[in-house]
Every structure is written in structure tokens, then in C-alpha cells.
Amino acid sequence: MQLERFALTAGEEVTPVRWKIEDTPERAEFREEFRAWLKTVLPEGWVDAIEKGDDKAFESARGSGWDFMSWMGTIGRSGYAAPLWPKEYGGLSGQSWMVQVIREELASHRLPTFGINLLGVGLAGPTIIEHGTEEQRRRYLSKILTGEEIWWEAYPPHRSGSDLASLSTRAVKDGDQWVINGQKVWTTLAQLAQYGMLLTRTDPDVPKHEGLTYFILDMHAPGVEVRPLKQMTGSSEFNEVFLNDVRIEDSQRVGAVGEGWRAARTTLMNERAALAGISLDPVSIFGGTRRDPWTSFVESIPNRNDPLVRQQIARLYIDQEVKEITAFRATSARLRGDQPGPEGSVNKVFNAEFNQRKSIFAMDSSGVSSVAWLAEDKLAESRATTFLRARANTIEGGTSEVLRNQIAERILGLPRDVEVDKAIAWSSTRRN
Ligand SMILES: Cc1cc2nc3c(=O)[nH]c(=O)nc-3n(C[C@H](O)[C@H](O)[C@H](O)COP(=O)(O)OP(=O)(O)OC[C@H]3O[C@@H](n4cnc5c(N)ncnc54)[C@H](O)[C@@H]3O)c2cc1C
């Protein structure tokens, strides 16, 4: 139940995109196969209700025994949750375009496109597949897919802020074990997770990128303390995690000692691709219907004839088109089979700021109900919570400033930012 609540706060139901590429025969066949599978696993009436656009019938089908966690298990065992993963680890050994087809079908069938285990499926899994041992792959991957074991991310850009490689969580070898000490703030879902991806400093006397080692952390190990942080939205999605003399077996190391940065880069690359698509659902802030959110959005604005308000609506509409076209470029690259490219950063920056503009406009245009509402007014509550939550969008998963630096360097080819500490031992660098 608690997990379900978090899944829904993550904007699980997304509005289907309007920009689509025509299917090749191969893609059309896969789409049909996936639709047929959906029909066999969803409650009776679900698919028909979607095809007819019958919201009432849909709600009744969804209410008849569908629940989020069982759905995770169903899709997790099917291979469709991670089509790119090798078959022997629960995937389909498929191609990148399959990810896109599955996402589109999930969205149009009003199913979660990102499970609660987004960090596990999107980040930990690919890192373990690429850098882990065979034993680790067999032990962890299938349970990530079915949601039986939830994962969190204990490091990216983060313990040390934007400059991940300067982190100070220490790991010291003791026989077959490592002893870990450190602290990490803002860890999403750590209070619900069984495992975490942990990047530590194992050698302070070499430059910052070279002395790092990556581990799988058991969240229930002695010495791991998770303190939920209460956010201004009233919920506690995030935590502060303290690691006090936590012992990790050497068998839980991912990659070689001192080569944690390589594994971390895999996690980071997948993080951006996973987070880039998450966008605020207009129906949750403006109300209206999911089939035509923009018309219902415009109709929901009381003073829509005011010229200044109209300008803002036009701006949001243009933003929406730009967002979809940018996402469409990423989609067409995926359909061609290309790897996630720099457009992940562009999408992340744009989406984060667009979410904020949308939620500010929703608050501005709803008058007094933005600040005080009746308990039964769920739309007003959702609008206010979404507005507050959207503040974090330009910080989490890499700040917009840092991502703009990356766009400048890697896409526009501008000179690289100066890195004064690149070649000196981490222990000699200045830190806060
Ligand atoms: C809601 C939320 C959820 C999060 N979830 C997780 C999680 O699950 N796991 C996890 O590990 N972390 C998580 N984080 C942490 C998050 O990734 C960091 O907050 C973020 O990377 C920025 O780091 P910082 O807060 O230390 O700020 P700093 O890095 O100290 O940055 C402070 C300011 O300086 C700017 N800045 C820094 N470096 C540069 C530069 N080179 N050029 C220009 N400007 C710069 C930044 O943009 C920012 O405005 C989460 C954060 C939030 C808000």
C-alpha cells in the first residue's frame, strides 16, 4: 500500500504522446504481440474500455482486482519490463525500439510506464549486467524486475553534490569484508528499499576519479540508519542515510577495486535516460479528461479570455509541442537502435523547467483555491502538492546548471569547465 502511494506520486499514468512514427512491419508485429499479451493479463473489459474511450468502463475494470504490486510481478516475469536485458536475466534480449513500443502501449493502456522500482530497473540492473559478477546477476536481476526487491541510489551526483567524484563515504578493507562509514542525504525511497547502489572512496591518495569502488549495499545490514525527511509536500519520499561501520562482503563489490567510476558512469548514463521522460501529468493539475488534456485544460481556466492569460496559454502550448518534438527525436533515435545520447540532458533540463512553469500557471489561474481548499477538492490538493514537488525537478538527477554545462561541452563543443583538482590526490583537495 505504501509502495503504491509512492508509485502514484511519481506521475505513473502518463498522457500518450501525439508525435508518433509509423511502424515498420517488424514493429507493428511486436506491438500486436504486446497488445495481445496485455489482453490476456489485464482484467476483463480493460482493453475494450481503452479502445472505446469509455472512462467509466475503464475505472470499473481497474477497480476489479488490479493492483500495482501484482502488476509489477506480472510484467516483471514477462520480459517486457526490460526488453533489452538478456533473456537469461529476465529480459527479451531485444532491441532498443522495443522499449519505445512498450512505453507507448503502456501509456495508451493507462498503465504505469515506470514501476516503483525505476531505480532498480533503470539504473541498478544495467550496472549489474555490465559490471557485476555472474553470481550477482543471478541473485539480483529477476527480483528487481518483479519488484520483489526495491533499490535506491546511494550516490549519483550527490553525496558530494554535483561533483560526484569528490564524495567522501569511506570503505576500508578488513579481511573479506569492507567497513563503510559515511552519510548521504536525499536518497529517494531508501526507507522502502532492500538494496542500494553505493559508491565509496577506497583510496584517498589518488585523484578523485581513481580511488572509488562500487558496492551493493544491503539496507538491513547493521549500521545502516535511514531517517526519512519530511518535505514541504507533507510526504517523505526522501531520506538521510547514515552508514556507521557497515560491513559489506567483498562478493558484493561491483567491478574492480578503484574502478567504481566506470560502474558509476553506467548508472549515471541510465539515470538521465530514465528521468528525462518523466513529465508532469496535466490532468493532475488542471483536471479534465486524459483523452484530450489540452482542450480540457483551456476550458478549465476561468479567465481564459484575458489577453495576458491567453499569452501564457499559448506559451505553454508551444512548450508542450517543443517538448514532444524533442522527445520524438529521442524516440526516433531509439527506434533506429541508437544508444541514449545527449538529448537525455536536453530533455531533462527542458522538462524540469516546463513542469515548474505549468504548475505555477495552474496555481495562478485557480484563484483562492490554490491556497485553501475544501477537503473533498482533490484537484486543488493535487495542484498544490504538484506545484511544491516540481521545485525539486531542477535539482534531482543533476541540477539544470550542471546539465547545461554538459550540453555546452558535449553537444555544442564549447571549451570544458576548468577542473583544478583533476590530477591531484583527493586527500589534498579542498572540500566543504
Ligand atoms: C527531490 C530530490 C531527490 C533526490 N534523490 C536523490 C537520490 O535518490 N539519490 C541521490 O544520490 N541523490 C539524490 N538527490 C540529490 C541531488 O542529486 C543533488 O541535490 C543534486 O545533484 C545537487 O547537489 P547539491 O544539492 O549538493 O548541490 P551542489 O552541487 O552543492 O550545487 C549547489 C548549486 O551550485 C550549482 N553548481 C554546482 N556545480 C556547478 C558547476 N560546475 N557549474 C555551475 N553551477 C554549479 C548547482 O546547480 C546548484 O545550483 C535528490 C535531490 C532532490 C532535491
Image (cartoon, rainbow, N blue to C red):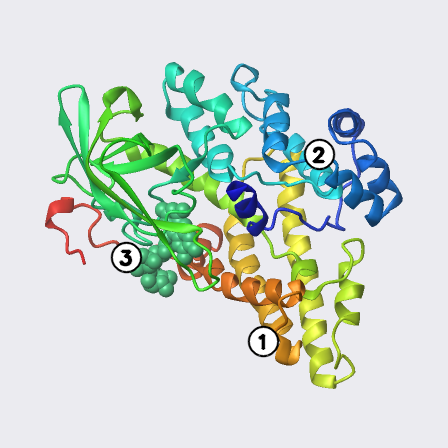
Relative to the observer, which residue lies in front, 23 or 418? 23
Give the labeled residue for mark 1: 372
Q: Quadrant of residue 130?
A: top left
Q: Which mark is residue 101?
A: none
Position in image of residue 18 (x %, y %): 76, 51
Residue 414 shows in this picture: no
Secondary structure, mark 1, is loop
Q: Considering only order in the chain, which callout, 1 or 2, is on the residue closer to the N terminus?
A: 2
Q: Is mark 2 within 8 Å of ligand 1?
A: no
Q: Are marks 2 and 1 in contact (CB under 8 Å)?
A: no
Q: Considering only order in the chain, which callout, 3 or 1, is on the residue closer to the N terminus?
A: 1
Position in image of residue 136 (x %, y %): 38, 19
Q: In the displayed structure, does residue 348 sit left or right of residue 162? A: right
Q: Amino acid at mark 1?
A: Ala
Which residue appears at 68% of the width and 60% of the height?
A: 282
Position in image of residue 264 (x %, y %): 35, 37
Q: Residues within 10 Å of mark 3 (few under 14, many from 20)?
A: few
Q: Considering only order in the chain, which callout, 3 or 2, is on the residue closer to the N terminus?
A: 2
Give the labeled residue for mark 3: 418
Q: Residues within 10 Å of mark 1 (few under 14, many from 20)?
A: few
Q: Quadrant of ligand 1?
A: bottom left
Position in image of residue 298 (x %, y %): 77, 70
Q: Amino acid at mark 3?
A: Val
**Residue at the front extreme of this rendering:** 375
Q: Amino acid at mark 2?
A: Gly
Q: Which mark is residue 65?
A: 2
